[in-house]
Amino acid sequence: MSFDLVIRNGLVYDGNGGTPFEADIGIKDGLIAEVGVCDGQADQVIDAAGAIVTPGFIDLHTHYDGQVSWDEKFEPSVYHGVTTVVMGSCGVGFAPVKPADHEKLVRLMEGVEDIPGTALSEGITWNWESFEDYMQAIDFPHTIDFAAQVVHDPLRVYVMGERAVFNEAATDDDIARMRDLTRAALEAGAVGFSTGRSDVHRSADGEWTPSSEATADELHGIAAAFDGLDHGILQAVNDFDLERGDPDAFDREWKLLEQFMAGAGGRPFSLSLMQRDFAPKQWRQILERSEDAKKRGLNISLQVAPRGIGVILGLQCTFHPFIGFPSYKKISHLPLADRVAQMRKPEFKAQLLSESSEKLAGDGTPIPPIADMLLAQIDFISCKMFRLGENPDYEQPIEQSVYKAAEADGVKPLEKIYDILLEKDGQEFLYFPIYNYTDLNYDAVFEMMSHPQAIMGLSDGGAHVGTICDASFPSYLLLHWARDRNGKGSIAIETAVKKLTSELADFAGFSDRGRLKVGLKANINVIDHQRLSLKPPRMVQDLPAGGQRLLQDAEGYITTIVDGVPVVRNDVLTGALPGRLVRVGNKNSKAA
Protein backbone atom coordinates (compact mmCIF):
# COMPACT_ATOMS: atom_id res chain seq x y z
CA MET A 1 0.00 0.00 0.00
CA SER A 2 1.24 3.49 -0.79
CA PHE A 3 0.79 6.36 1.63
CA ASP A 4 0.68 10.13 1.41
CA LEU A 5 2.59 10.37 4.70
CA VAL A 6 4.06 7.91 7.18
CA ILE A 7 5.08 8.66 10.78
CA ARG A 8 7.79 6.15 11.68
CA ASN A 9 9.39 4.95 14.91
CA GLY A 10 7.20 6.92 17.31
CA LEU A 11 5.82 5.90 20.71
CA VAL A 12 2.09 5.90 20.08
CA TYR A 13 -0.43 7.10 22.66
CA ASP A 14 -3.60 6.25 20.77
CA GLY A 15 -6.03 8.30 22.86
CA ASN A 16 -7.71 5.37 24.60
CA GLY A 17 -5.66 5.73 27.78
CA GLY A 18 -3.82 2.43 27.47
CA THR A 19 -0.14 1.54 27.49
CA PRO A 20 1.79 3.26 24.67
CA PHE A 21 3.33 1.15 21.93
CA GLU A 22 5.86 1.60 19.15
CA ALA A 23 4.28 1.73 15.71
CA ASP A 24 4.25 3.49 12.38
CA ILE A 25 1.18 5.41 11.27
CA GLY A 26 0.30 5.57 7.60
CA ILE A 27 -1.92 8.32 6.22
CA LYS A 28 -3.85 8.27 2.95
CA ASP A 29 -6.39 10.81 1.66
CA GLY A 30 -6.56 12.59 5.02
CA LEU A 31 -7.36 9.42 6.97
CA ILE A 32 -5.36 7.01 9.11
CA ALA A 33 -4.79 4.05 6.80
CA GLU A 34 -2.48 1.91 8.95
CA VAL A 35 -1.26 1.69 12.55
CA GLY A 36 1.56 -0.81 12.95
CA VAL A 37 4.12 -1.62 10.29
CA CYS A 38 3.83 0.57 7.19
CA ASP A 39 5.97 -1.08 4.54
CA GLY A 40 4.56 0.77 1.54
CA GLN A 41 5.97 3.77 -0.26
CA ALA A 42 5.25 7.22 1.17
CA ASP A 43 5.36 10.68 -0.37
CA GLN A 44 6.45 12.10 3.00
CA VAL A 45 8.09 10.46 6.01
CA ILE A 46 8.31 11.91 9.51
CA ASP A 47 10.91 10.29 11.76
CA ALA A 48 9.34 10.24 15.23
CA ALA A 49 12.17 8.35 16.96
CA GLY A 50 12.33 9.50 20.59
CA ALA A 51 9.01 11.34 20.25
CA ILE A 52 5.45 10.58 21.28
CA VAL A 53 2.64 10.41 18.73
CA THR A 54 -0.86 11.42 19.83
CA PRO A 55 -4.21 12.26 18.28
CA GLY A 56 -4.68 15.96 17.64
CA PHE A 57 -5.97 17.76 20.72
CA ILE A 58 -9.52 19.10 21.00
CA ASP A 59 -10.31 22.39 22.74
CA LEU A 60 -13.92 22.43 23.84
CA HIS A 61 -14.09 26.04 25.07
CA THR A 62 -12.95 28.86 22.78
CA HIS A 63 -14.12 32.25 21.54
CA TYR A 64 -12.79 32.53 17.99
CA ASP A 65 -16.33 33.40 16.79
CA GLY A 66 -15.32 36.73 15.26
CA GLN A 67 -11.68 35.99 14.50
CA VAL A 68 -12.62 32.92 12.45
CA SER A 69 -14.22 35.16 9.83
CA TRP A 70 -11.03 37.11 9.03
CA ASP A 71 -8.11 35.04 10.35
CA GLU A 72 -7.31 31.55 9.13
CA LYS A 73 -4.50 30.78 11.59
CA PHE A 74 -6.26 30.10 14.92
CA GLU A 75 -3.34 31.45 16.91
CA PRO A 76 -2.38 30.66 19.59
CA SER A 77 -4.28 27.32 19.79
CA VAL A 78 -2.55 25.87 16.74
CA TYR A 79 0.82 26.16 18.51
CA HIS A 80 -0.31 23.81 21.29
CA GLY A 81 -1.25 20.68 19.41
CA VAL A 82 -4.91 21.66 19.04
CA THR A 83 -6.42 20.42 15.78
CA THR A 84 -10.12 21.00 16.54
CA VAL A 85 -11.70 23.88 18.46
CA VAL A 86 -15.29 24.41 19.56
CA MET A 87 -16.39 28.06 19.39
CA GLY A 88 -19.43 29.79 20.82
CA SER A 89 -18.86 29.32 24.55
CA CYS A 90 -20.59 31.17 27.41
CA GLY A 91 -23.53 32.29 25.26
CA VAL A 92 -21.70 35.05 23.36
CA GLY A 93 -21.14 35.18 19.62
CA PHE A 94 -22.21 36.81 16.36
CA ALA A 95 -25.07 34.82 14.83
CA PRO A 96 -27.89 35.03 14.16
CA VAL A 97 -27.81 38.79 13.75
CA LYS A 98 -29.70 41.59 12.05
CA PRO A 99 -27.60 44.37 10.48
CA ALA A 100 -28.83 46.88 13.04
CA ASP A 101 -27.52 44.73 15.91
CA HIS A 102 -23.90 44.30 14.84
CA GLU A 103 -22.64 46.85 17.35
CA LYS A 104 -24.70 45.34 20.20
CA LEU A 105 -23.00 41.99 19.73
CA VAL A 106 -19.58 43.62 19.42
CA ARG A 107 -20.10 45.45 22.73
CA LEU A 108 -21.18 42.21 24.37
CA MET A 109 -18.12 40.30 23.19
CA GLU A 110 -15.82 43.19 24.05
CA GLY A 111 -17.11 43.33 27.61
CA VAL A 112 -17.49 39.62 28.30
CA GLU A 113 -14.40 38.30 26.56
CA ASP A 114 -12.01 41.29 26.39
CA ILE A 115 -11.65 41.36 22.61
CA PRO A 116 -11.14 44.93 21.31
CA GLY A 117 -14.38 46.27 19.89
CA THR A 118 -12.53 48.20 17.20
CA ALA A 119 -10.83 44.99 16.02
CA LEU A 120 -14.16 43.15 15.93
CA SER A 121 -15.95 45.97 14.15
CA GLU A 122 -13.27 46.24 11.48
CA GLY A 123 -12.40 42.56 11.18
CA ILE A 124 -15.71 40.72 11.20
CA THR A 125 -17.01 40.24 7.68
CA TRP A 126 -20.70 40.17 8.69
CA ASN A 127 -21.67 38.32 5.50
CA TRP A 128 -24.42 36.41 7.30
CA GLU A 129 -27.70 36.82 9.14
CA SER A 130 -28.91 33.35 10.12
CA PHE A 131 -26.73 30.86 11.95
CA GLU A 132 -26.72 28.68 8.87
CA ASP A 133 -25.44 31.67 6.88
CA TYR A 134 -22.73 32.14 9.50
CA MET A 135 -21.55 28.54 9.19
CA GLN A 136 -21.42 28.89 5.44
CA ALA A 137 -19.50 32.18 5.64
CA ILE A 138 -16.77 30.84 7.93
CA ASP A 139 -16.37 27.49 6.15
CA PHE A 140 -13.21 28.38 4.27
CA PRO A 141 -9.68 26.95 4.71
CA HIS A 142 -8.03 27.44 8.11
CA THR A 143 -5.06 25.84 9.84
CA ILE A 144 -7.22 23.58 12.01
CA ASP A 145 -10.79 22.29 12.21
CA PHE A 146 -13.51 24.16 14.08
CA ALA A 147 -17.09 23.63 15.19
CA ALA A 148 -19.66 26.23 16.20
CA GLN A 149 -22.29 26.30 18.93
CA VAL A 150 -25.53 28.28 18.74
CA VAL A 151 -25.15 31.07 21.29
CA HIS A 152 -27.88 32.43 23.53
CA ASP A 153 -27.08 36.15 23.59
CA PRO A 154 -27.33 36.85 19.83
CA LEU A 155 -30.23 34.43 19.52
CA ARG A 156 -32.17 36.36 22.17
CA VAL A 157 -31.30 39.72 20.60
CA TYR A 158 -32.30 38.45 17.16
CA VAL A 159 -35.72 37.31 18.36
CA MET A 160 -36.49 39.92 21.04
CA GLY A 161 -34.65 43.05 19.89
CA GLU A 162 -34.36 45.72 22.57
CA ARG A 163 -36.41 43.61 24.96
CA ALA A 164 -33.50 41.18 25.13
CA VAL A 165 -31.01 43.87 26.07
CA PHE A 166 -33.21 45.15 28.89
CA ASN A 167 -33.64 41.59 30.15
CA GLU A 168 -37.38 41.26 29.79
CA ALA A 169 -38.84 37.79 30.13
CA ALA A 170 -39.28 35.98 26.84
CA THR A 171 -42.86 35.29 25.79
CA ASP A 172 -44.09 31.88 24.66
CA ASP A 173 -43.81 33.07 21.07
CA ASP A 174 -40.22 34.29 21.69
CA ILE A 175 -39.24 30.93 23.15
CA ALA A 176 -40.83 29.02 20.30
CA ARG A 177 -38.95 31.17 17.78
CA MET A 178 -35.62 30.67 19.59
CA ARG A 179 -36.26 26.94 19.73
CA ASP A 180 -36.99 26.78 16.01
CA LEU A 181 -33.86 28.74 15.10
CA THR A 182 -31.74 26.55 17.36
CA ARG A 183 -33.20 23.41 15.81
CA ALA A 184 -32.48 24.65 12.29
CA ALA A 185 -28.86 25.37 13.24
CA LEU A 186 -28.43 21.97 14.86
CA GLU A 187 -29.83 20.27 11.79
CA ALA A 188 -27.35 22.25 9.67
CA GLY A 189 -24.46 20.91 11.75
CA ALA A 190 -24.05 23.20 14.78
CA VAL A 191 -22.33 21.24 17.54
CA GLY A 192 -24.59 22.49 20.33
CA PHE A 193 -25.99 25.44 22.28
CA SER A 194 -24.37 27.57 24.98
CA THR A 195 -25.67 30.07 27.52
CA GLY A 196 -24.06 32.39 30.05
CA ARG A 197 -25.29 33.26 33.55
CA SER A 198 -22.31 34.98 35.15
CA ASP A 199 -22.48 38.24 37.07
CA VAL A 200 -18.89 38.92 36.05
CA HIS A 201 -19.94 38.90 32.40
CA ARG A 202 -21.13 42.34 31.32
CA SER A 203 -21.20 44.24 28.06
CA ALA A 204 -18.58 46.93 27.51
CA ASP A 205 -21.27 49.37 28.71
CA GLY A 206 -21.62 47.53 32.03
CA GLU A 207 -24.98 45.94 31.17
CA TRP A 208 -26.02 42.40 32.05
CA THR A 209 -25.75 39.96 29.19
CA PRO A 210 -29.12 39.13 27.59
CA SER A 211 -28.95 35.45 28.48
CA SER A 212 -28.03 36.04 32.13
CA GLU A 213 -31.63 36.74 33.14
CA ALA A 214 -33.37 34.11 31.03
CA THR A 215 -36.04 32.18 32.91
CA ALA A 216 -36.18 28.45 33.45
CA ASP A 217 -39.06 28.30 30.96
CA GLU A 218 -36.88 29.95 28.31
CA LEU A 219 -33.93 27.65 28.83
CA HIS A 220 -36.11 24.56 28.99
CA GLY A 221 -37.95 25.65 25.86
CA ILE A 222 -34.80 26.28 23.84
CA ALA A 223 -33.32 22.96 24.97
CA ALA A 224 -36.34 21.20 23.50
CA ALA A 225 -34.75 21.93 20.11
CA PHE A 226 -32.63 18.81 20.73
CA ASP A 227 -35.70 16.56 20.89
CA GLY A 228 -35.24 13.55 18.63
CA LEU A 229 -31.67 14.42 17.59
CA ASP A 230 -28.80 12.04 18.21
CA HIS A 231 -26.20 14.79 18.33
CA GLY A 232 -25.62 18.11 20.06
CA ILE A 233 -24.23 19.32 23.38
CA LEU A 234 -25.18 22.05 25.84
CA GLN A 235 -22.79 24.34 27.70
CA ALA A 236 -23.21 26.92 30.45
CA VAL A 237 -21.21 29.18 32.70
CA ASN A 238 -22.81 30.23 35.98
CA ASP A 239 -21.47 31.86 39.14
CA PHE A 240 -24.83 31.39 40.86
CA ASP A 241 -25.51 35.08 41.47
CA LEU A 242 -22.65 35.42 43.95
CA GLU A 243 -22.25 39.14 43.38
CA ARG A 244 -25.83 39.81 44.37
CA GLY A 245 -25.47 38.25 47.81
CA ASP A 246 -28.67 36.22 47.61
CA PRO A 247 -28.43 33.22 50.01
CA ASP A 248 -30.97 31.26 47.95
CA ALA A 249 -29.26 31.92 44.64
CA PHE A 250 -27.30 28.68 44.45
CA ASP A 251 -30.35 26.45 44.87
CA ARG A 252 -32.42 28.54 42.48
CA GLU A 253 -29.76 28.63 39.77
CA TRP A 254 -28.98 24.94 40.10
CA LYS A 255 -32.63 23.99 39.68
CA LEU A 256 -32.74 26.18 36.58
CA LEU A 257 -29.72 24.39 35.10
CA GLU A 258 -31.30 21.02 35.81
CA GLN A 259 -34.44 22.09 33.95
CA PHE A 260 -32.20 23.22 31.08
CA MET A 261 -30.50 19.81 30.98
CA ALA A 262 -33.76 17.94 31.28
CA GLY A 263 -35.27 19.89 28.39
CA ALA A 264 -32.58 18.57 26.06
CA GLY A 265 -33.65 14.98 26.51
CA GLY A 266 -30.40 13.56 27.82
CA ARG A 267 -27.94 15.32 25.53
CA PRO A 268 -24.49 15.93 27.11
CA PHE A 269 -24.22 19.12 29.17
CA SER A 270 -21.08 20.79 30.54
CA LEU A 271 -20.72 23.44 33.22
CA SER A 272 -17.60 25.46 34.00
CA LEU A 273 -15.98 24.44 37.30
CA MET A 274 -13.39 26.60 39.06
CA GLN A 275 -12.25 27.31 42.58
CA ARG A 276 -13.22 30.96 43.05
CA ASP A 277 -11.42 33.24 45.49
CA PHE A 278 -14.68 34.93 46.43
CA ALA A 279 -16.48 31.59 46.96
CA PRO A 280 -13.72 29.09 47.74
CA LYS A 281 -16.04 26.20 48.67
CA GLN A 282 -18.57 26.57 45.88
CA TRP A 283 -16.77 24.13 43.58
CA ARG A 284 -17.44 21.35 46.06
CA GLN A 285 -21.13 22.23 46.11
CA ILE A 286 -21.15 21.99 42.33
CA LEU A 287 -19.43 18.61 42.45
CA GLU A 288 -21.98 17.28 44.93
CA ARG A 289 -24.95 18.53 42.92
CA SER A 290 -23.42 17.19 39.72
CA GLU A 291 -22.93 13.75 41.23
CA ASP A 292 -26.54 13.73 42.37
CA ALA A 293 -27.78 14.89 38.96
CA LYS A 294 -25.78 12.13 37.28
CA LYS A 295 -27.37 9.53 39.54
CA ARG A 296 -30.78 10.83 38.47
CA GLY A 297 -29.95 10.32 34.81
CA LEU A 298 -28.83 13.81 33.77
CA ASN A 299 -25.82 13.73 31.45
CA ILE A 300 -23.60 16.33 33.11
CA SER A 301 -19.87 16.95 32.82
CA LEU A 302 -17.74 19.67 34.38
CA GLN A 303 -15.20 21.67 32.37
CA VAL A 304 -11.99 22.10 34.36
CA ALA A 305 -8.64 23.79 33.76
CA PRO A 306 -5.18 22.33 34.45
CA ARG A 307 -3.83 25.40 36.22
CA GLY A 308 -4.83 28.69 37.77
CA ILE A 309 -6.95 30.91 35.57
CA GLY A 310 -5.26 34.23 35.96
CA VAL A 311 -4.82 37.74 34.74
CA ILE A 312 -1.66 38.94 33.02
CA LEU A 313 -0.89 42.41 34.35
CA GLY A 314 1.25 44.84 32.38
CA LEU A 315 1.39 48.36 31.01
CA GLN A 316 0.46 46.95 27.59
CA CYS A 317 -2.43 44.89 28.95
CA THR A 318 -6.12 45.65 29.27
CA PHE A 319 -5.78 45.82 33.04
CA HIS A 320 -3.09 46.70 35.56
CA PRO A 321 -3.35 48.16 39.07
CA PHE A 322 -2.71 51.76 38.03
CA ILE A 323 -5.19 52.02 35.20
CA GLY A 324 -7.73 53.89 37.33
CA PHE A 325 -5.35 56.31 39.08
CA PRO A 326 -5.89 59.94 38.05
CA SER A 327 -2.22 60.56 37.25
CA TYR A 328 -1.98 57.46 35.10
CA LYS A 329 -5.21 58.25 33.28
CA LYS A 330 -3.66 61.55 32.17
CA ILE A 331 -0.85 59.71 30.35
CA SER A 332 -2.73 56.51 29.35
CA HIS A 333 -3.13 57.71 25.75
CA LEU A 334 0.64 58.02 25.24
CA PRO A 335 2.78 55.39 23.50
CA LEU A 336 4.34 52.85 25.85
CA ALA A 337 7.82 54.40 25.75
CA ASP A 338 6.45 57.81 26.69
CA ARG A 339 4.37 56.38 29.52
CA VAL A 340 7.39 54.57 30.89
CA ALA A 341 9.47 57.75 30.72
CA GLN A 342 6.84 59.65 32.71
CA MET A 343 6.40 56.88 35.26
CA ARG A 344 10.15 56.75 35.91
CA LYS A 345 10.14 60.36 37.12
CA PRO A 346 10.29 60.31 40.95
CA GLU A 347 7.77 63.14 41.29
CA PHE A 348 5.25 61.36 39.04
CA LYS A 349 5.64 58.12 40.97
CA ALA A 350 5.21 59.87 44.32
CA GLN A 351 2.08 61.66 43.14
CA LEU A 352 0.48 58.54 41.67
CA LEU A 353 1.17 56.42 44.76
CA SER A 354 -0.42 59.09 46.93
CA GLU A 355 -3.71 58.71 45.00
CA SER A 356 -6.54 56.18 45.03
CA SER A 357 -7.97 54.41 42.03
CA GLU A 358 -11.22 55.66 40.59
CA LYS A 359 -14.00 53.18 39.86
CA LEU A 360 -13.39 51.25 36.64
CA ALA A 361 -16.36 48.98 35.92
CA GLY A 362 -19.16 50.54 33.92
CA ASP A 363 -17.12 53.52 32.72
CA GLY A 364 -17.39 52.46 29.09
CA THR A 365 -14.29 50.26 29.11
CA PRO A 366 -14.29 46.45 29.00
CA ILE A 367 -13.11 46.25 32.63
CA PRO A 368 -15.13 43.70 34.63
CA PRO A 369 -16.58 44.51 38.07
CA ILE A 370 -14.05 42.19 39.69
CA ALA A 371 -11.27 44.67 38.83
CA ASP A 372 -12.51 47.18 41.41
CA MET A 373 -12.63 44.45 44.04
CA LEU A 374 -9.07 43.43 43.24
CA LEU A 375 -7.78 47.00 43.47
CA ALA A 376 -9.43 47.39 46.86
CA GLN A 377 -7.47 44.37 48.13
CA ILE A 378 -4.15 44.96 46.38
CA ASP A 379 -1.99 44.25 49.44
CA PHE A 380 -3.75 40.94 50.04
CA ILE A 381 -3.77 39.76 46.43
CA SER A 382 -0.08 40.58 46.00
CA CYS A 383 0.50 37.43 48.09
CA LYS A 384 -0.29 35.43 44.99
CA MET A 385 1.01 37.75 42.30
CA PHE A 386 4.14 36.47 40.57
CA ARG A 387 6.62 36.96 37.80
CA LEU A 388 6.17 34.03 35.41
CA GLY A 389 9.80 34.01 34.31
CA GLU A 390 11.39 32.94 31.05
CA ASN A 391 10.19 29.37 31.68
CA PRO A 392 6.73 30.25 32.95
CA ASP A 393 6.04 28.84 36.41
CA TYR A 394 2.33 28.89 37.25
CA GLU A 395 2.68 27.01 40.54
CA GLN A 396 4.73 29.25 42.81
CA PRO A 397 4.77 29.54 46.62
CA ILE A 398 4.06 32.73 48.53
CA GLU A 399 7.81 33.15 49.10
CA GLN A 400 8.16 34.06 45.42
CA SER A 401 5.25 36.51 45.43
CA VAL A 402 5.27 40.25 44.91
CA TYR A 403 4.19 40.64 48.54
CA LYS A 404 7.34 38.93 49.79
CA ALA A 405 9.52 40.88 47.34
CA ALA A 406 8.01 44.12 48.63
CA GLU A 407 8.55 43.02 52.21
CA ALA A 408 12.20 42.26 51.48
CA ASP A 409 12.67 45.72 49.93
CA GLY A 410 10.83 47.49 52.75
CA VAL A 411 8.18 48.99 50.45
CA LYS A 412 4.43 48.57 50.06
CA PRO A 413 3.23 45.98 47.52
CA LEU A 414 1.74 48.63 45.23
CA GLU A 415 5.09 50.36 44.93
CA LYS A 416 6.80 47.06 44.18
CA ILE A 417 4.24 46.34 41.45
CA TYR A 418 4.91 49.81 40.03
CA ASP A 419 8.65 49.16 39.84
CA ILE A 420 8.28 45.68 38.33
CA LEU A 421 5.95 46.84 35.55
CA LEU A 422 8.57 49.41 34.48
CA GLU A 423 11.17 46.69 33.93
CA LYS A 424 12.10 45.64 30.38
CA ASP A 425 11.10 49.14 29.22
CA GLY A 426 7.56 48.59 30.45
CA GLN A 427 7.17 45.18 28.84
CA GLU A 428 7.33 43.10 32.02
CA PHE A 429 4.24 41.14 33.04
CA LEU A 430 2.92 39.91 36.36
CA TYR A 431 0.61 36.94 36.76
CA PHE A 432 -2.29 36.87 39.19
CA PRO A 433 -4.41 33.66 39.34
CA ILE A 434 -7.98 34.65 40.22
CA TYR A 435 -9.33 31.11 40.03
CA ASN A 436 -7.91 27.71 41.06
CA TYR A 437 -5.12 29.02 43.30
CA THR A 438 -6.99 30.17 46.39
CA ASP A 439 -4.79 28.13 48.73
CA LEU A 440 -1.56 28.76 46.82
CA ASN A 441 -1.43 25.14 45.70
CA TYR A 442 -2.94 22.82 43.09
CA ASP A 443 -4.78 20.49 45.47
CA ALA A 444 -8.19 21.67 44.26
CA VAL A 445 -7.10 21.61 40.62
CA PHE A 446 -5.92 18.01 40.90
CA GLU A 447 -9.12 16.95 42.65
CA MET A 448 -11.27 18.65 40.01
CA MET A 449 -9.30 17.15 37.11
CA SER A 450 -9.46 13.69 38.68
CA HIS A 451 -13.23 13.70 39.15
CA PRO A 452 -15.00 11.14 36.94
CA GLN A 453 -17.34 13.81 35.56
CA ALA A 454 -14.53 16.20 34.67
CA ILE A 455 -13.53 17.08 31.12
CA MET A 456 -10.77 19.46 30.05
CA GLY A 457 -11.82 22.94 28.96
CA LEU A 458 -11.90 26.64 29.83
CA SER A 459 -8.91 27.73 27.73
CA ASP A 460 -10.88 30.68 26.31
CA GLY A 461 -8.74 30.55 23.15
CA GLY A 462 -9.26 33.75 21.17
CA ALA A 463 -10.70 35.65 24.15
CA HIS A 464 -9.42 37.90 26.95
CA VAL A 465 -6.71 38.85 24.52
CA GLY A 466 -5.32 41.66 26.69
CA THR A 467 -5.53 39.93 30.07
CA ILE A 468 -5.36 36.13 29.81
CA CYS A 469 -3.39 33.69 27.69
CA ASP A 470 -4.64 30.19 28.50
CA ALA A 471 -4.88 28.57 25.07
CA SER A 472 -1.63 26.86 26.14
CA PHE A 473 -3.57 24.58 28.55
CA PRO A 474 -2.97 21.42 26.44
CA SER A 475 0.79 21.95 26.44
CA TYR A 476 0.74 22.70 30.15
CA LEU A 477 -1.17 19.53 30.98
CA LEU A 478 1.40 17.45 29.10
CA LEU A 479 4.54 19.13 30.38
CA HIS A 480 3.58 20.00 33.96
CA TRP A 481 1.16 17.33 35.11
CA ALA A 482 2.44 14.48 32.92
CA ARG A 483 6.18 15.18 33.20
CA ASP A 484 7.46 17.73 35.71
CA ARG A 485 5.42 17.09 38.86
CA ASN A 486 7.14 13.74 39.45
CA GLY A 487 4.53 12.03 41.57
CA LYS A 488 3.19 15.05 43.49
CA GLY A 489 -0.31 14.51 42.16
CA SER A 490 1.01 13.81 38.69
CA ILE A 491 -0.94 12.42 35.73
CA ALA A 492 0.26 9.64 33.45
CA ILE A 493 1.02 10.66 29.88
CA GLU A 494 -1.59 8.26 28.52
CA THR A 495 -4.21 9.76 30.84
CA ALA A 496 -3.32 13.31 29.85
CA VAL A 497 -3.54 12.41 26.16
CA LYS A 498 -6.91 10.73 26.67
CA LYS A 499 -8.21 13.83 28.47
CA LEU A 500 -7.17 16.00 25.51
CA THR A 501 -8.48 13.71 22.77
CA SER A 502 -10.94 10.82 22.98
CA GLU A 503 -12.78 12.05 26.09
CA LEU A 504 -13.57 15.34 24.39
CA ALA A 505 -14.34 13.75 21.03
CA ASP A 506 -16.81 11.38 22.70
CA PHE A 507 -18.44 14.19 24.65
CA ALA A 508 -18.83 16.47 21.62
CA GLY A 509 -19.95 13.74 19.23
CA PHE A 510 -16.84 13.93 17.02
CA SER A 511 -16.95 10.31 15.95
CA ASP A 512 -14.26 10.72 13.31
CA ARG A 513 -11.38 11.93 15.49
CA GLY A 514 -9.79 11.75 18.93
CA ARG A 515 -8.06 8.38 18.49
CA LEU A 516 -5.27 6.93 16.39
CA LYS A 517 -7.33 4.28 14.66
CA VAL A 518 -7.62 3.12 11.07
CA GLY A 519 -10.39 4.97 9.26
CA LEU A 520 -10.38 8.04 11.51
CA LYS A 521 -9.31 11.51 10.50
CA ALA A 522 -5.55 12.04 10.42
CA ASN A 523 -5.35 14.81 13.00
CA ILE A 524 -2.10 13.92 14.76
CA ASN A 525 0.69 15.37 16.90
CA VAL A 526 4.33 14.29 16.95
CA ILE A 527 5.84 15.74 20.14
CA ASP A 528 9.28 15.78 21.70
CA HIS A 529 7.84 15.38 25.19
CA GLN A 530 11.14 15.79 27.00
CA ARG A 531 11.80 19.07 25.21
CA LEU A 532 8.24 20.38 25.43
CA SER A 533 8.17 23.83 27.02
CA LEU A 534 6.16 27.02 27.18
CA LYS A 535 7.49 30.46 26.36
CA PRO A 536 6.43 33.59 28.25
CA PRO A 537 3.30 35.35 26.98
CA ARG A 538 4.07 38.10 24.49
CA MET A 539 2.02 41.03 23.28
CA VAL A 540 1.60 41.45 19.54
CA GLN A 541 -0.24 44.13 17.61
CA ASP A 542 -1.77 42.17 14.75
CA LEU A 543 -5.52 42.47 15.18
CA PRO A 544 -7.62 44.60 12.83
CA ALA A 545 -7.58 48.35 13.57
CA GLY A 546 -4.21 47.95 15.26
CA GLY A 547 -5.60 45.86 18.12
CA GLN A 548 -3.24 43.90 20.31
CA ARG A 549 -3.37 40.48 21.91
CA LEU A 550 -1.33 38.14 24.05
CA LEU A 551 0.14 35.05 22.39
CA GLN A 552 2.11 32.22 23.93
CA ASP A 553 4.45 29.93 22.04
CA ALA A 554 5.59 26.39 22.76
CA GLU A 555 8.63 24.34 21.84
CA GLY A 556 8.59 20.63 21.21
CA TYR A 557 5.88 20.18 18.57
CA ILE A 558 7.80 18.37 15.86
CA THR A 559 4.71 18.17 13.68
CA THR A 560 1.01 18.88 14.00
CA ILE A 561 -1.07 17.31 11.26
CA VAL A 562 -4.62 18.22 10.22
CA ASP A 563 -6.49 16.16 7.63
CA GLY A 564 -3.23 14.42 6.80
CA VAL A 565 -1.38 17.69 6.13
CA PRO A 566 1.36 19.12 8.40
CA VAL A 567 0.32 22.58 9.63
CA VAL A 568 3.15 22.94 12.17
CA ARG A 569 6.74 21.77 11.74
CA ASN A 570 9.24 22.37 14.53
CA ASP A 571 6.86 24.82 16.25
CA VAL A 572 6.38 26.98 13.14
CA LEU A 573 3.34 27.21 10.89
CA THR A 574 3.85 25.63 7.49
CA GLY A 575 1.30 27.82 5.72
CA ALA A 576 -1.00 24.87 4.94
CA LEU A 577 -4.73 25.40 5.50
CA PRO A 578 -6.47 22.01 5.58
CA GLY A 579 -8.84 22.86 8.45
CA ARG A 580 -12.57 23.30 7.84
CA LEU A 581 -15.85 23.67 9.66
CA VAL A 582 -17.05 20.49 11.36
CA ARG A 583 -20.78 19.96 10.85
CA VAL A 584 -21.88 17.47 13.49
CA GLY A 585 -24.79 15.13 12.75
CA ASN A 586 -25.15 16.54 9.23
CA LYS A 587 -24.84 14.45 6.09
CA ASN A 588 -22.14 16.84 4.87
CA SER A 589 -20.30 16.65 8.18
CA LYS A 590 -16.74 15.52 8.66
CA ALA A 591 -17.98 14.04 11.94
CA ALA A 592 -21.27 12.56 10.74
Image (spheres, rainbow, N blue to C red):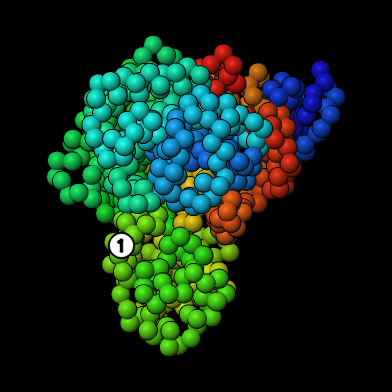
Residue 449 against residue 298 in the figure, above or below: below
Q: Which x, y percent locates residue 242?
A: 23, 48
Q: Number of marks in the image? A: 1
Tell me the residue at 46%/22% (across/down).
Answer: 185
Q: Position of residue 202 (x, y in %)?
A: 34, 48
Q: Is residue 493 left or right of residue 306?
A: right
Q: Residue at x 46, y 57 (%)?
A: 467
Task: Judge from the rendering whether residue 355 lies leftward or rightward of residue 187; answer left or right.
Answer: left
Q: Is residue 140 above or below residue 364?
A: above
At x 50% / y 81%, what residue is drawn?
342
The 10 Å Cα crowd at callout 1, few under 14, some 14 to 19, many 20 or more, is some
Whether residue 360 is visible: yes
Is 27 displayed left or right of 217 in the figure? right
The residue shown at (50%, 60%) is 393
Q: Quadrant of the C terminus?
A: top right
Q: Quadrant of the N terminus?
A: top right
Residue labelled with disc 1: 372
